[in-house]
Amino acid sequence: MQFLKILLWCLLAFVAAIFTFGNWTWVTIHLWGGLDAEVNLPFMLLLTFLAGLLPTWLYFRTARWRLEQRLSTAERVIADLKPTPVAMGADPVPVPVTTTNPTPPVPPPLTLTP
């Protein structure tokens, strides 16, 4: 599988080199204030590609980081809620048992104010 990945990247680099060699022309970009910039076409296409890729990549990296933080918080909460195992041969801690039924709380009386 690693061989196929390397082969794909080499093929992609070869196609990019052929495209660059065949389209090495200057493109004029009209900027503000009457300024003109002459840029090679492959360089301009690379900048355009990166202008679309970087914001999307940053958004998904941020979302992934937030999800990892939420997951680690949830794992810590679960780890805190798990009971600790009792060592072999140790006496278990007695749990007090209440035999009386507690009375349910009485709600406060309703008062009507005009």
Image (tube, rainbow, N blue to C red):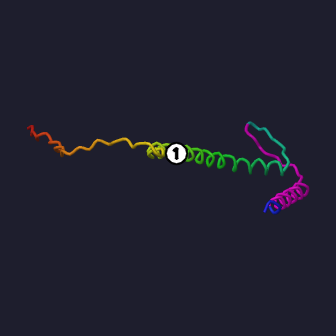
Residue 34, by quadrant, is top right
User: For the N terminus, which image quadrant?
Assistant: bottom right
Bin the neighbour count of mark 1 within 10 Å (Cα to Cα): few under 14, some 14-19, many 20 and up. few
The secondary element bearing badge 1 is classed as helix
Task: Specify the amino acid type for callout 1.
Answer: Arg
User: Chief secondary structure of the magenta span?
Assistant: helix
Magenta region: which residues? 5-32
Please state if 108 lies on the left or on the right of 76 as rendered.
Answer: left
Count the labels in the image.
Answer: 1
List the residue tagged with mark 1.
70
Q: Residue at x 55, y 43 (%)?
A: 69
Q: Quadrant of the C terminus?
A: top left
Is residue 29 a member of the stretch shown in magenta? yes
Residue 29 drawn at (x, y percent) = 79, 45
Q: Is residue 32 left or right of residue 75?
A: right
Of residue 67 and residue 23, the one placed in the foreground of this image is 67
Q: Residue at x 84, y 51 (%)?
A: 42
Q: Using residue 73 as the reference point, say whether residue 110 is left or right of it.
A: left
Residue sitting nearer the eye, 27 or 70:
70
Q: Between residues 38 and 100, which one lies in front from this camera angle? A: 100
Q: Nearer the viewer, residue 107 or 97?
A: 97
In the picture, measured across the screen, residue 98 lies left or right of residue 82, that is: left
Residue 31 percent location from the top left of the image: 75, 41
Across and down, in percent, residue 83 comes to: 44, 45
x and y percentages locating residue 102 in the rendered image: 18, 43
Q: Is residue 52 magenta?
A: no
Specify the quadrant of the image occupied by residue 2.
bottom right
**Which residue reaches farthest front?**
89
Task: Answer with the quarter of the image where residue 92 lies.
Answer: top left
